[in-house]
Image (spheres, rainbow, N blue to C red):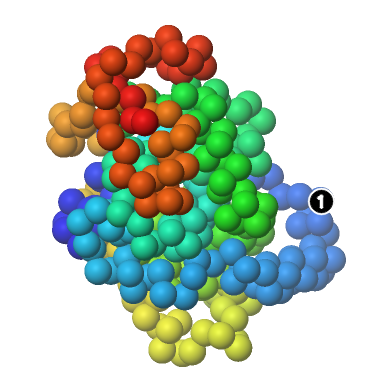
Amino acid sequence: MDEDDTSFSCLLYCDEEPFESLTTPTPSPGQQQGDDGEDEEEVMVELYKAKQRLFAPQRDYCSLLLQQQPHGVSSARLKAVRYIIYAMGRLGLEAATAFNAVNYLDRFLSINSHLRWEEWMVEVVSVACLSLACKLDQVNIPSLHDLQMEEVMGHSFRASTIRDMEITLLKALQWRLACVTPFSFLLLLFSKYIANASRLLLCSLLDPSFLRFDASLLAASALLTCSTTAPLQQIHHLATRVDRLIHPMSQTDHEVKECFNMMKALYLEDLSNNPGRYSGHQYWRTPISVLNPFRTDCTTVNRSAVSRCLFAEFKPESHDNCTADQDKDTGPCTSVQEMK
């Protein structure tokens, strides 16, 4: 993977801070009750570990991503993850929303990895994944118009098109949206390192190599990596709790060691490129001037084209005689072009 793709600085396209509002949550009553809280935590950890593979993409998905073929599933995923993280920062969405949206994306792409992924196809799936995640996690749900950002998208989709795509996603995912992600384990293991571990896990979303590890192991690796500067006693206490996350029946010692080493390497690389990111006092900011410009032309794609191209491998023809007022729920467009 190119350096620009692996560097987390490429994920953000403006001076936005995705985790600016992410603070260490107040302990729940159960967490303040000593042994009872620990027992409850252990039960929930085991439950999440038992469920996590139900929300994993298909088995050969990771190897397909590493092939990096043009217009292939790897390129599609990269664009989609970048959009999801950008939207999280711009709209101030919860971190759980971004992790869930990427989970939906990976599961859907693994089912449809045989397709030739055109840019507009990637965008409509990305918006639909994020829209569904917002409905699950957000109190204030952004409109479909707000989710479509001209600065990072080359096409504009009618609301009816996105809603159709949402239904397609729900059917493909068998309506299983309350997924278990690495961030789920972070929230479960109340820790003051949750913010930095969340930053690191968000960084790891862009690297498909991490998909071969269980969500629990990824969370454990991120927490321990981000706690290396803590006092020895705190590290020992955290390590005891984090040890519960490593599934003894599915993760070999080699896999555990490999995941920890990869997470540590990612942490050091990101820290060298962005000093102060994990200090807890500075927020990550990426000057817009250092990023590659995005297309500013906007294209409207109709709902029948989406269905045919995604699920009948139909290559649509483009026409230039479309007007933006053909569907009142479409956002503002320039250079409108409809696929039929």
Amino acid type of the residue tagged 1 in the rendering: Pro
Locate residue 151: give its quadrant: top left
Locate residue 297: give its quadrant: top left
Q: Pinpoint residue 268: horizontal percent, then vertical percent.
A: 27, 62
Locate residue 116: give its quadrant: bottom left
Instruction: Please give left or right for residue 228 compared with residue 142 in the image.
Output: left
Question: Residue under circle 1?
Answer: 29
> Residue drawn at (21%, 29%), measured in percent from left and top?
295
Above or below residue 179? Residue 162 is: above
Instruction: Please give left or right for residue 310 compared with residue 117 in the image.
Output: right
Q: Nearer the viewer, residue 228 or 294?
A: 294
Q: Pinpoint residue 214: horizontal percent, then vertical percent.
A: 52, 72
Above or below residue 88? Residue 236 is: below
Question: Circle 1: is it few (<14), some (14-19), or many (20+) Cα within 10 Å?
Answer: few
Label 1: state its secondary structure. helix
Q: Nearer the viewer, residue 331 or 306?
A: 306
Residue farthest to the top, as pictured:
325
Q: Quadrant of the C terminus?
A: top left
Q: Pinpoint residue 185: horizontal percent, then vertical percent.
A: 60, 62
Instruction: Please give left or right for residue 255 compared with residue 37 in the image.
Output: left
Residue 279 shows up from this direction? no
Residue 273 shows up from this direction? yes
> Residue drawn at (80%, 66%), measured in percent from left and top?
40
Q: Pinpoint residue 179: horizontal percent, then vertical percent.
A: 63, 57
Q: Nearer the viewer, residue 177 or 326?
A: 326
